[in-house]
Image (cartoon, helix red, strand yellow):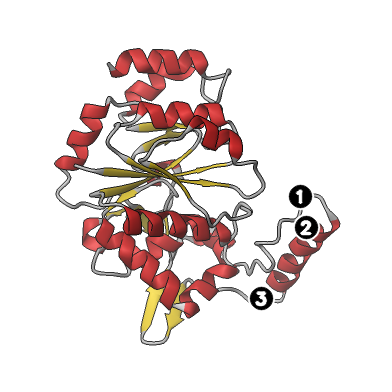
Amino acid sequence: MKLAFLISAHQDARQLARLVNSLPEDSEFYIHIDRKADIRPFQERLDRPNIRFIEHRVNVVWGSLNEVEYQVELIRAALYYGRADYLITLSGMDYPLWGNGRIKRFFSEAGGREFLQGISMLRQGKASRNYRDFRFLASRPWPVGSLQSKLRVALRRLVAATGVQKTLRIHCPGKTYTLYKGAAWWAITPDLARLVVEEWDGNAHLVGYFRTSFCPAETFVQTVAFNSGFASRCMLAEGRYQSLAALTPLTYIHYHPVVKVLDESDLDTLLASGKMFCRKVVSHDSDRLVELIDANRQ
């Protein structure tokens, strides 16, 4: 069982190295470092033949389509250079809760299942409101609070006030897609990964829809998967949308009100969660927690 870890990071090279060194040694690692960050500290700590830093670096703006851009570049690299059975997304601030033997057994016994959770955003009422707004200029790296950022927000509100909304069905030539939402943390097979790249490269209409959409890193891959023959292998959530945590199948994340930096006081909660990974782990504040997790992983 060969695993490929697709990792995005923008800071804390020490923590990224700690994460990579904690995972199965025979894995493949594909790493995207935000273009705003100095890549050298990361490269200095991680210099192994099975680690590849993505050359096409994106100036990441949260909630914009360029988050999908680096997701696709990570997938593309894993498919081109590697031969993994599963592609697993992580951030540099994640950490494994399970031992490596257990992780590899889990995927060995998965039988081609896609660990990608999603829920249809049709008939979700207020929960779908963000996805109905047009978000123009979302990929521009304007600081929050700047004049440009304020004008961007004003434009979104002005368009919404006219009653013009995005549809939750995406009408492309030859096919109509329903919008599905999930989390940016998943594990998929190379077959599904190829379809994601094919849609990104070849379906300009679909990509164009997400260019003005809210947080497509949580919807693009899900929409591709759940509107394809892979849907039956994915993890469909039915009923009303509850929370993003409920759509994150393998990773424990305390999302609200903001993503919590985990420390030793969270250990019991993490172990009881049954999740394979956790986020958000940082140098210094989470050091004692990592020691306790490592002792439990042995």
Furthest residue toward right: 147
Q: Quick one: label 1 or label 3, which is nearer the N terminus?
A: 1
Mark 1 lies on a secondary structure that is loop
Image point 62% across, 67% down: which residue? 133
| In the depicted structure, whether residue 238 falls above or below residue 251 | below
Instruction: Estimate how packed mark 3 is, as few (under 14), some (14 to 19) or many (20 or more) residues with alpha carbons within 10 Å.
Output: few
Q: Which residue is mark 3?
A: 163
Q: Amino acid at mark 2?
A: Ser
Q: Which residue is mark 2?
A: 149
Percent coordinates x, y for residue 86 in the rendering: 27, 48
* Frontmost residue, 187 versus 46: 46
* Frontmost residue, 40 versus 156: 40
Percent coordinates x, y for residue 40 in the rendering: 60, 38
Q: Amino acid at mark 1?
A: Val
Q: For residue 144, which numbered disc appears in the image?
A: 1
Instruction: Report if the CB atoms under discs 2 and 1 are less than 8 Å apart.
Output: yes
Which corner quadrant holds the N terminus? top left
Which corner quadrant holds the C terminus? top left
Percent coordinates x, y for residue 246 in the rendering: 39, 43
Percent coordinates x, y for residue 294 in the rendering: 36, 17
